[in-house]
Amino acid sequence: MTFQVSKEDGLFYRQTLFDQAKRVVIKVGSAVLTDHQGLNQPVIESLARQISFLCSTGREVILVSSGSVAAGRQRLGVSRERRGGLKVKQALAAIGQGLLMQAYEQAFAEHQQQVAQVLLTHSDLSHRDRYLNVRNTINTLFEFGVVPIINENDTVSVEELRFGDNDTLGALITNMIGADMFIILTDVDSLCTANPADDTSARPVYTVATIDKQVEKMAGSTSSLLGTGGMQSKIRAAKMVASCGGSSFIGPGRNTNILQELFSGNLVGTFFLPMSEKMGGRKHWIAHVLRPKGFLVVDDGACKALVERGKSLLPSGIIEVRGRFGVGAPVHCLREDGEAVAAGLSNYRSRDIEKIKGCKSSRIQEILGYKDSDEVIHRDNLVLLDDFLREL
């Protein structure tokens, strides 16, 4: 199958999936929400009107929104040229987050729609109990008919706690709550075959069946004026959602009726179909949410056992241990050339794996004085990584 589908088939798939979508995540970035003065109030009002309309049709909607830093900058009159690094950004976010929510509260109130604020850092999703708590909170808000408005907690986030961009955050939320669709509203009309500014033969791509290297290359030629994500992060986010059985859309967020046009079947923006094989929730958490605490270099035989035969990782196939980690820590399995082939949760501490690497499982008790498992990583806690996941 090529990455694109015909225009007729694309329209059919789009309309079918939009009609079936009952739970939707909408991400709007700073490129849409703000201008050089700060928050763009007409855009916020348009979003509130359209999302309220979707809720009135019986759909559950989450809004993932940027804009707190821009709102803080606007309130204080701080120019974009003002330097100061992370501490200035955190201060602006602290001021702006309340202003952003106030703007949403007022806009949604015009349509009698309740909203709630949810601020997250990466650690809120990387710990399994907190991950489940976030999911339970969102589901409870749905029961009350409330639209959750989610943003990264920029006020407290440092590098190790950051998602990187709200495209990634939106994709993780989409998969976490089992949403049917992830809609990314940005300042470009669609993914194009080339950069229209440089290539007159460039044309929009309306429907993508499979996100392959050709599609990822196209993303590198599409530029955005504002925001931290860029088209490449949006393509990665769409692929994350597709792996869990969801569809995605990337399109023009400043179109005042974009959501109603989409759900009415208009051919606008770029639509990404779900993958045929769906990744389970726990394996999605291991593959997409957790960041590795260490690495295990494995030999060719172990690689084949993992990739071709669906086996667990045994100590006999481990050549080298990199990093220090404890039991249950997320680790990546690497080929000898450094290529990552799998992610999983370790049954042993790094210092104990160092002692049993290259040995048969039958010797674990003899070497360590205990044996919790024959496997260093059990297949149930292991996910194979494709080219996309290796880049995350």
Image: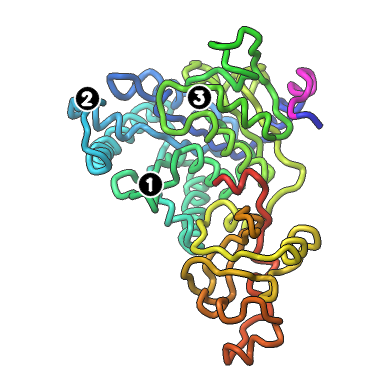
The tally of labels here is 3
In this view of the protein, which residue sits in the foreground, 278 or 337? Answer: 337
2 or 1: tag closer to the N-terminus? 2
Q: Which residue is mark 2?
A: 79
**Which residue is painted at 52% across and 57% down in the image?**
290
Circle 1 sits on which residue?
119
Left or right, 48 with respect to 176, comes to left
**Labels 2 & 3 near each other (Cβ < 8 A):** no
Residue 18 visible in the current orientation? no
First in sequence, mark 1 or 3: give its number. Answer: 3
Instruction: Find residue 211 and report its image quarter.
Output: top right
**Secondary element at tag 2:** loop
Q: Residue 50, labelled with which disc?
A: 3
Q: CA distance from mark 2 to mark 1?
A: 25 Å
Residue 169 image label: none
**2 vs 1, front mark:** 2
Q: CA distance from mark 1 to mark 3?
A: 23 Å
Residue 263 lies, in percent from the top left, at 63, 24
Q: CA distance from mark 2 to mark 3?
A: 32 Å
Amino acid type, callout 3: Gln
Position of 237 compared to 97: left or right?
right
Query: Callout 1: 10 Å neighbours few (<14), some, many (20+)?
Result: some
x, y percent for residue 314: 69, 74
Coordinates of residue 38 in the picture (x, y in percent): 29, 23
Of tags 2 and 3, the one toward the viewer is 2
Quadrant location, the N terminus: top right
Amino acid marked by disc 1: Leu
**Segment colored magenta:** 3-11
Q: Is residue 34 above or below residue 61?
A: above
